[in-house]
Image: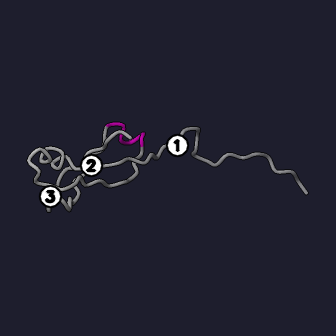
Amino acid sequence: MAKRKNVRAKGKKGKDVRVRVILECNSCLRNSVNKRSTGISRYITQKNQHNTPNPLELRKFCPYCYKHTIHGEINK
């Protein structure tokens, strides 16, 4: 029986490429001063650091604003 060498997975070199990010509604933050919304909408997703090094912004539905708004990446 032959001994197996320690083999690394192909394509993976060190640091993880995919990271988990939190997206937060931008209009809830602005309207919280007016007490229009009762909370802040947040989504959890993943992004590829090599393809999108800039902060991620997606248009998602906000249940507090009752419409589709821009959700931006926040720091953990």
Magenta stretch?
49-54
As drawn, 66 above or below 19: below
Q: Which residue is mark 2?
A: 24
Check disc 2 and give the amino acid type. Answer: Glu
Q: Is residue 13 magenta?
A: no
Q: Nearer the viewer, residue 25 or 60?
A: 25
As drawn, 52 above or below 42: above
Do the residues under discs 1 and 2 have CB atoms within 8 angstroms?
no
Number of marks in picture: 3
Mark 2–mark 3 Cα distance, whole angstroms, equals 12 Å
Q: Position of residue 73 (x, y in %)?
A: 30, 44
Label 2: how many Cα within 10 Å (few below 14, some 14–19, many 20+): many
Mark 3–mark 1 Cα distance, whole angstroms, equals 35 Å
Do the residues under discs 2 and 3 have CB atoms within 8 angstroms?
no
Check disc 1 and give the amino acid type. Answer: Asp
Label 3: how many Cα within 10 Å (few below 14, some 14–19, many 20+): some
Q: Earlier in the sequence, mark 1 or mark 2?
A: 1
Q: Which of label 3 and label 1 is nearer to you?
A: 3
Q: Which residue is mark 3?
A: 65
Q: Name the residue at 42% across, 48% down.
A: 20
